[in-house]
Image (tube, helix red, strand yellow):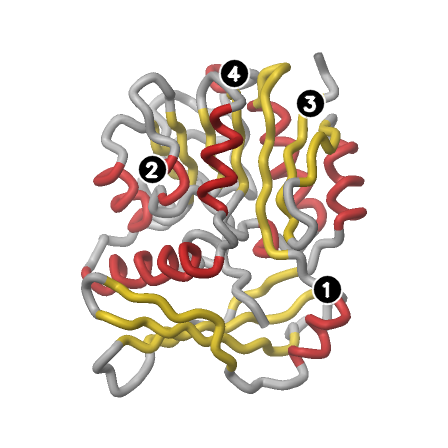
Amino acid sequence: MGRVNGDDCESCRTRGDQFTCEAEGGGGDDSLGAEPLTADRRRRLLDDEGDLNAGGDADLDFWRATAATTSGPVVELGCGAGRILAALSTADRALIGLDLDDAALGLARERLPGAELIQADLLTWTPPETLRHGAGLVIAGGDLLPLFTEATDLERLFAQAAMLLRSDGAFGIDATLIDADLLSEAASDSAWSEDVRWMSDEVGEVRRESRLLPDPAGRAGCAQLQIRHWHAGDATPDQRDPFAIRAWGPAELEHIAEGVGLHLHQRASADRLRWLLRSTHV
């Protein structure tokens, strides 16, 4: 099974950061996901980013090309440690990132001191008036979508994007295209398999392995994903707890998008859910 974790799969919930003004539906909250950026957490964040760089099918090239065709602020939903935003950073572009994981945002703040980073839970966050209809590009990348296992939660994410977009803006998504039947079949075999290998400047070779486990609730199209990393010289891997993922089909996503006033503008890949959507409200 290929990699399906998001930019920061350590926190298996959907994410966001601290906001200085009052946000409708809840402002910034220092208690959300509070966790120090320890050396171990930093390494895990960098491991996740290394996986994406090695196995993300040149996703950063896609985001750079997309950003070049848009103008205005860039907002990333579930920005993790800022991997994508850092690739889009220019002197004339406002960057806004949301994530629940405080440790990930700590690394993002180191990389992007000029960005507005907001800690918030994407399951409950509502864009404040100051952010509505102003973004030229809204991003849900890094395999964020499979972490949403309920349709109502994914509808909320798409609705957030629709509220953030200005009339000529684009909502970009990028996620692994997962076949629901194959996901269920793979989850019946708990064997570990290798996904990617890559070289780290800090620890040398890193090997990522993963396995799928049945969804405890027996939900259709869902499974538990567990990953581990082997670092050169380590006797045991750094193993994470399993977390839930869902296989979303293109038709399901189009239906959700249409329901919140978004239409599919471009499919940028036949092998991934790499889409650009635009608002139907001009």
Q: Amino acid at mark 4?
A: Gly
Residue corresponding to mark 3: 279
* Residue 141: percent from left, percent from top: 52, 44
Q: Residue furthest top?
A: 282
- Distance, label 4 to label 3, CA atoms, is 12 Å
Mark earlier in primary sequence (2, 3): 2
Residue corresponding to mark 2: 86
Mark earlier in primary sequence (1, 2): 2
Determine the residue positioned at 44% across, 40% down: 16
Left or right: 165 in relation to 197: right
- Within 10 Å of disc 2 (Cα), the crowding (few <14, some 14-19, many 20+) is some
Numbered disc 3: secondary structure: strand
Determine the residue positioned at 71% across, 30% down: 265
Residue corresponding to mark 4: 134
Left or right: 237 in relation to 186: left
Front of the two marks 4 and 1: 1
Q: Quadrant of the N terminus?
A: bottom right
Q: Amino acid at mark 3?
A: Ser
Q: Tag on residue 4?
A: none
Name the one closer to the observer, 78 or 201.
201
Numbered disc 4: secondary structure: loop
Mark earlier in primary sequence (4, 1): 4
Q: Amino acid at mark 2?
A: Ala
